Image (cartoon, rainbow, N blue to C red):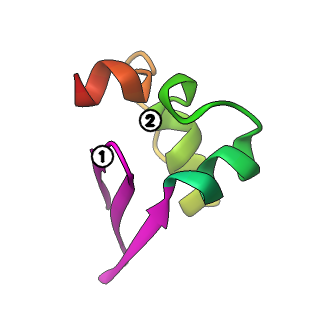
Amino acid sequence: MTALSFDEHGVDVVYEGTDFRLEKALIEDAVGKAYPDVTDHEVLQLVDPEPALSGEPQRIAEIID
């Protein structure tokens, strides 16, 4: 399971027992969108090659608001 924790500066990730941080600029460069417009599903797809996506994607702006 992959856990994502969002804040205004980036995302803390736990993937297969490894903790790391994805900074806002890295996410923006990888997705090609402003950080607040990126969705949780897009971040999950950056981390996990075969993510189990469920529910509707949420924009980061909605998550951290």
Q: Residue 53, can we see it? A: yes
Q: Which residue is mark 1?
A: 6
Residues at marks 2 and 1, CA–CA distance in whole angstroms: 9 Å
Which amino acid type corresponds to the residue marked 2 in the rendered image?
Asp
Look at 55% across and 23% down and name the residue there: 37
User: Which of pointers 2 and 1 lies earlier in the amino acid sequence?
Assistant: 1
Left or right: 15 as drawn, with respect to 50: left
Look at 44% across and 35% down and name the residue there: 40
Is label 2 or label 1 in front? 1
**Are the residues tagged 2 and 1 within 8 Å (C-beta)?**
yes
Question: Where does the image place residue 17, in percent across and percent down from the top left?
Answer: 30, 82
Q: Which residue is mark 2?
A: 40
Question: Where does the image place residue 50, in percent across and percent down from the top left?
Answer: 60, 54
Q: Residues within 10 Å of mark 2 (few under 14, many from 20)?
A: some
Which amino acid type corresponds to the residue marked 1 in the rendered image?
Phe
Look at 69% across and 31% down and name the residue there: 33
Left or right: 41 as drawn, with respect to 1: right
Disc marking residue 42 = none
Left or right: 45 as drawn, with respect to 52: right
- How many numbered marks appear? 2
Magenta residues, dominant SS class = strand
Quadrant in which the C terminus is drawn: top left
